[in-house]
Image (cartoon, rainbow, N blue to C red):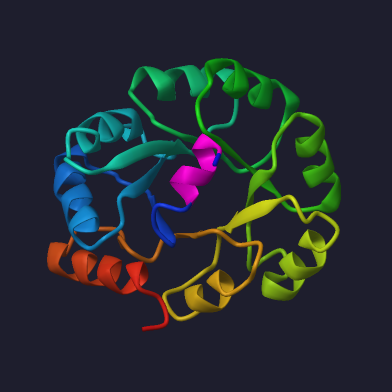
Amino acid sequence: MSPIETIMRTAPVIPVLVIDEVRYAAAIAEALVKGGLRVLEVTLRTADALEVIREMKQVEGAIVGAGTVLNEHALADALEAGSEFIVSPGLTEGLTKAALAAEVPYLPGIATSSDIMRGLDLGLDRFKFFPAEANGGIPALKAIAAPFGMARFCPTGGITAASAADWLALEPVLCCGGSWLVPKGVPDLAAIEAAARAAAAPGQ
C-alpha cells in the first residue's frame, strides 16, 4: 500500500479538527486516540493550528496531519510543525508537485472527473471527495468514481455520525472525514471519546 493508503486504512473516520485553543489540543487528541481514532487532521483554519499540530504529535499513538493546506508555503509550515500527512481542499499542480517532492502522504480534494484525471496525470490515485454532501452526496460519488476503478476516496464535508456507515459501505471509499467528533467550545472529553469509539466501529 502507498503511505497515504496506509493512513486512510488506519481507521474508518478521520476527525477533521478546527481547534481554537492550544491548551485543549493534547487532551482532545488523547480522547480521540483512546476512542480508536488515531489519524487526526488539524485544519489550518485557526491562528494556532501549527502549534496544535505540535502538541497533538506528543500524544502516544496519534498520527497527526495538516488539513486546509492551500499552497506550497502552507505545506512548508505544516511540515515544519511535524505534520505526518497533508490534506488539501482542492488539487493544484504546484501543491501536488511540492508534496510529492517532500515525499509526504498527500490527499488532495476533488469534486469532478476532471479533477481526478488531473490527479492521475500527476501520479495520484487517492483523493478526498469534498465537500461530499454539497457535491451531491453518495449518488454523486458513485457516478464520479465509476470510470476510475483505480481511485479510492475519503469523502469529507457534511458527513455525520448517522451517515458515515452509508458512505463507508461504498467500495471506492476507504475512510471518511468527520467534523462532528469535536464540537466547538470547551471540549467534553468523555463525549469526544464516546463519539470516537462509535465512529471507529460504524454500523455496530
Give the left or right position of residue 61, taking residue 91 as reference: left
Say whether residue 68 is visible: no
Magenta stretch: dominant SS? helix
Q: Does the magenta stretch include residue 6?
A: yes
Q: Image point 22% across, 48% down: which residue?
A: 29
The part of the image, by quadrant, that contains residue 132 is bottom right
List x then y, in percent, for residue 58. Answer: 17, 33
Q: Quadrant of the C terminus?
A: bottom left
In-front residue for pair 198/169: 169
Question: Where residue 24 appears, x then y in whole percent?
Answer: 16, 46
Residue in the image at 16% along x and 43% along y? 26
Question: What quarter of the picture does the N terminus occupy?
Answer: top right
Give residue 67's position: percent from left, percent from top.
47, 40
Residue 64, image quadrant:
top left
Going by the image, does 65 lie left or right of 130? left
Q: Tell me: 203 left or right of 101.
A: left
Residue 94 falls in which quadrant of the image? top right
Above or below: residue 18 compared with residue 73: below
Left/right of residue 136 with respect to residue 16 in the rendered view: right
Whether residue 8 is visible, yes or no, is yes
Total marks placed: 0
Q: Spot the residue most to the front.
A: 1
Highlighted magenta segment, given as a residue range: 2-8
The relative height of residue 143 versus residue 186 in the rendered view (above or below) is below
What residue appears at the point 78 percent right and 38 percent down from the top-left corner? 120
Place of residue 87 in the rendered image (x, y in percent of width and height, measured from the top left) = 53, 39
Residue for point 65% across, 68% down: 171
